[in-house]
Amino acid sequence: MIENDLAINLARAQFAFTISFHFLFPAFTIGIASYLAVLEGLWLKTDNGVYANLYRYWLKIFAVVFAMGVVSGIVMSYQFGTNWSVFSDKAGPIIGPLMAYEVLTAFFLEAGFLGVMLFGINKVGRKLHFVATLAVAIGTFISAFWILSVNSWMQTPVGFAINEVGQYVPAAGWWDIIWNPSFHYRLVHTVLAAYLTTAFAVGAVGAWHLLKDKTNPGARKMFSMAMWMAALVAPTQIFMGDLHGLNTLEHQPAKVMAMEGHYESHPDGAPLILFGIPNSKEKRVDYAIEIPKASSLILKHDLNAPLAGLDTIPDEDEPPVGIVFWSFRIMVGLGFAMLGIGLWSLLARSRKKLYEWPLLHRAALVMGPSGFIAVLAGWVTTEVGRQPFTIYGLLRTSESAAPLDAPAVAASLLAFVVVYFIVFGAGIVYIFKLASKTPEAHEPTPDDAPIRSAGITPAAAVLEGDHEEGATT
Amino acid sequence: MSGTELTVIWAGIIAFAVVVYVIMDGFDLGIGILFPNFKVGTDRDTAMNSIAPVWDGNETWLVLGGGGLLAAFPLAYAIILPALYAPLIAMLLGLVLRGVAFEFRWRDPSHRARWDFAFTAGSVIATFAQGITLGALLQGITVEGRAYAGGWWEWLTPFSLLTGFALLAGYALLGCCWLIWKTEGPLQRQCYSYAGRLGILLLIAIAIVSIATPFLEEEYYSRWLAYPGIIATAQIPLATLVISVLFFRSLSKRQEAAPFFYALGLFGLCLVGLAVSMWPDVIPGRITIWEAAAPYESQMFMLIGAGIMVPVILAYTAWAYWVFRGKVGSDGYH
């Protein structure tokens, strides 16, 4: 069975690797697509050129991220079958239709209008182009809707029966299946996370340019917009995250126990363990720094409320505590840091110093990747916290894998690692290059690129000022 | 509507998604395959520009095909995908390389050659893998119970390699004809000269595959070659002959749009032939569409969505193509 375990663990590693890379991209594009819609809408309304230029600036970055999201996404849709075929056979009748709806109502919408959005600025009227931008933004949201419904059903499965060949088939209305108990919370929490991720990425780019030149109108506008998002969405997200946690306590108690590091039950008030090293062999948290009763306060709004621990869960049903404990803390810690930046920016704004405080700008710069790290930490928490199940409480991960030999999966895992690091690594470099360019008064569109790459010698390009290397701007 | 009929409708929808994918991403991938033959500079830029606004939407039909298979025929999805593990992984990685090349090529002009290579390599790998997948499916997959039971390499045979090459020729032809329609000048002339040769290459490949197929399985033989079925099935090679003649004539008459549609006609006939071989199995010789079908509630729920959305999708897709109508320049559209 060791051979079997190795094959399954390789498959898990491959899925974790590919989904983590993939999620970075929609976490960004969901936010940027909406941001672009807002920018274009403001431009149409106010005719202020700053919005038009910011739109074109971020459109170029959006194009790169979106392409990476699409290609890494196709990998996911086929990986359910190639590596998790037993899960696909069993859960297909329920999650299959939801994913089909994702393709029909979201993927085609984004993909169909993307061409006009990126290349059609000079081909269709302003209003029609705005429709294209909106369609892409709405498409990203609809996509999040369906896939999160699928994931939520795996966490809190309802509305099913098991047929004679072991498939989970629909046995209730589709409404109940789609709006399963954890879906509302996961949907709001994840979409807000996408907006926050984008806000801090945009904020960091704005801060970077402000540190070089605090009068640049594009930098000022994007920094201000990003800091509004930070100030408003970070606290909302903390609140929603808390609600999400309460919902998880109700439906997936083992996950919350792992998040909290509660190996033991606490009949009168459980402590909030801030830091420590979970020791699953001895079933305790070593070097724990804790606040007594605070966990009961947060989870049950009662200092003395009893909270069950992992001692009430059979060992074979326990998730890996160490990973979940720490991924949760990373996410929450970053969430509070985001809140801190948001509040700091409000302070600066009230003193009319939003563009004048280099310390704030440096902090915002450092916080640029915070959303990306937080969303990965959050997904690790929820997915590893669901283990050892693929469908919580029903189907184990070890029973979900495809009948592939370890060498086959090892080879594919290696191939993915190599290709992804090269390709997406390059993409990330290009995004940084684009973001390091100063927002200018006449931002080119993505399809100006062919003009510049065809036949312009480096010498001539250097003379053009900030169009160095004959590169596109 | 009965469950039996609903399942047949879904088989039709999945087949439709596959057909649309082959048509639309076929010419995208074909341009990638032919890319090294185009002159660096405006020719390559023009070729890219002819598909840059539409490639993503085109590729999405592949996701509908796969996702639709999972939803409507989960058992088939669960057996076929692990059976074709290596070619499918190769295809996915090829599509990654191809997809990012569109964007990265512009972003990094000093390394344009590297991303041109990725564009071609990705297109060739993805196409070849798709062709192998087709051949492997036709030639048979070992099934035990509800799972694939063959080894790593069952998919790899002379026949599947043949179908791989055939698809390379086919997509290259589609790409070529698309460029004939969308470009002018030297690039278009270059494509006219390729189209004839690719057409011949494809027809040879089709002939070999057609001759080999009936000998793969007893069932294929009796469908295609035994009397009285042969009266109906013989129409397909006959129609292929007619379309081929029309195709070559349209090339010699320097027609611009017609060659593309005749090439599509050839593809269409091949796909009809595939259906003749496979019906009513989803895994030929092993699993019927009804055995693999998802429950009625699942298929019906999706049918409503598909019935509404597919026409809508086709409509806005057609609009997007119309926005980018006309000849492509190397400096964007005008």
Image (tube, coloured by chain):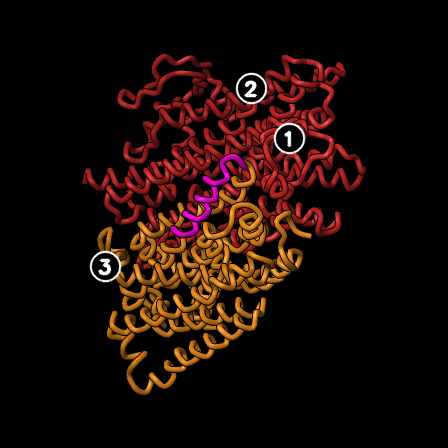
Chain colours: A red, B orange
Q: Is residue B64 above or below residue A463?
A: below
User: What residue is disc 2 on?
Assistant: A366
The chain containing the residue under callout 3 comes to B
Please tell me whether the stretch drawn in magenta is mainly helix, strand or loop: helix
Task: Say which amino acid is labelled 3.
Answer: Glu
Of the 4 image quadrants, the one containing the C terminus of chain A is: top right
In the rendered image, residues at marks 1 and 2 fall on the same chain: yes
Chain ID of residue with mark 2:
A
Question: In x, y percent, where is residue A253?
Answer: 41, 33
Query: Percent position (x, y) of residue A120?
Result: 67, 49
For mark 1, what is the residue?
A467
Q: For label 1, count other residues whose C-alpha is less than 10 Å away and answer few (under 14), some (14-19) or many (20+).
A: some
Please tell me in which quadrant of the rendered image residue A32 appears: top right
Asked if residue A39 lies in the magenta stretch, the reply is no
Q: Is residue B110 magenta?
A: yes
Magenta residues span: B109-125
Residue shown at 50% from the left, 45% from the top: A70
Q: Position of residue B13 (x, y in %)?
A: 47, 65
Tag 2, which secondary structure?
helix
Q: Which mark is residue B144?
A: 3
Residue type at mark 1 is His
Image quadrant assignment for residue B296? bottom left
